[in-house]
Image (cartoon, rainbow, N blue to C red):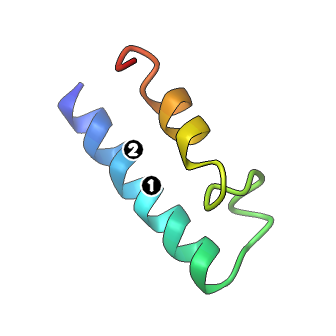
Amino acid sequence: RRRYALILRKQNKLAKREAQGMTTPGSAPCPAGIPAGQGAELGHPSRR
């Protein structure tokens, strides 16, 4: 589970960087930069 959390954190960081730098519709279908709360909730459903 810890590995999954780390991977999700890395993915979130990359998504935020992509959203800030240049939004790519192919790699990020949903705007991860704006709905950060929703992404976190979906990523960590057991961590509510």
User: Which of the image's four quarters has the C terminus?
Assistant: top left
The residue drawn where x is 69% and y is 62% is 27
For this orientation, the residue located farthest to the left is: 2
Write down the residue under mark 2: 8
> Label 1 crowding class (10 Å Cα cut-off): few <14, some 14-19, many 20+?
few
Q: Secondary structure at mark 1?
A: helix
Residue 42 in the figure: left or right of residue 10: right
Q: Secondary structure at mark 2?
A: helix
Q: CA distance from mark 2 to mark 1?
A: 5 Å
Percent position of residue 40, x then y: 48, 37
For this orientation, the residue located farthest to the bottom is: 21
The residue drawn where x is 42% and y is 27% is 44
Percent position of residue 8, x then y: 39, 44
The residue drawn where x is 31% and y is 34% is 4
For this orientation, the residue located farthest to the top is: 46
The reply to whether discs 2 and 1 touch (Cβ–Cβ < 8 Å) is yes
Quadrant of residue 5 in the image?
top left
Q: Compared with residue 20, is residue 29 higher up or lower down, i.e. above or below?
A: above
Residue 27 in the figure: left or right of residue 7: right
Residues 17 and 2: in front is 17
Q: Compared with residue 5, is residue 13 higher up or lower down, i.e. above or below?
A: below
Percent position of residue 30, x then y: 75, 51
Total tally of numbered discs in the picture: 2
Amino acid on which the number 1 mark rests in the picture? Gln
Write down the residue under mark 1: 11
Residues 7 and 23: in front is 23
The residue drawn where x is 46% and y is 66% is 14
Residue 20 in the figure: left or right of residue 23: left
> Label 2 crowding class (10 Å Cα cut-off): few <14, some 14-19, many 20+?
some
